[in-house]
Image (tube, grey):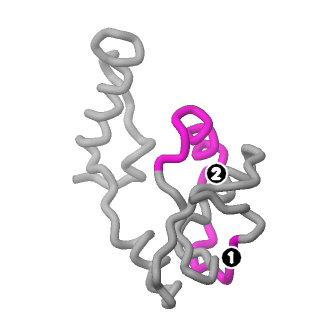
Amino acid sequence: MKMKISDIKIGNRFRKDLGDIHALADSIKDIGLLQPIVINENNELIAGQRRIDACKYLGWTEIPTYTVNLENIIAGEFHENELRKDFSYTEGVAILEEIERRRVGHKPRKGCKFNTLSRGKQG
């Protein structure tokens, strides 16, 4: 279901550093919004602040939403942001190399540097 962004109630959020919104906006522009934002039955945002900001940057006035019956917004924000797993360093390198190979139709260049997905984590 789509909803007007202006109708979404965004309360006090614990995450203050939203990262590179322009890069997320570029991704959404290139391949679309892969996951809707999450709201509760009162139209209060549970998850998706970065997606909202990126879509606003793109000039969107509506955004796909998923509604859940969850009163504890703080718990939803925590589970959305903390209980996830980033790619390991080697997984990130492998997926970026595959994207590059498919993009240009050949094997990836040697010495391809990886730093976008790992955020300094190794695994």
| Neighbours of disc 1 within 10 Å: few (<14), some (14-19), many (20+) | some
Point out the stretch of residues depicted in magenta.
8-34
The residue at the far front in this view is 1
Residue 30 position (above or below residue 34): above
Residue at image point 64% right, 51% down: 21
Element marked by disc 1: loop
Residue type pointed to by label 2:
Ile
Q: Position of residue 44 (x, y in %)?
A: 62, 79
Q: Is residue 8 left or right of residue 100?
A: right
Dot 1 corresponds to which residue?
A: 10
Residue 68, compared with residue 25, is above or below; it is below
Q: Quadrant of residue 49?
A: bottom right
User: Which residue in the structure is indicated by mark 2?
Assistant: 21
Q: Report the front residue among 24 and 119.
A: 24
Depicted 120 relative to depicted 75: above or below: above
Residue 2: image x %, image y %? 62, 58
**Place of residue 105 in the rendered image (x, y in percent of width and height, measured from the top left):** 34, 10
Q: Quadrant of residue 113?
A: top left
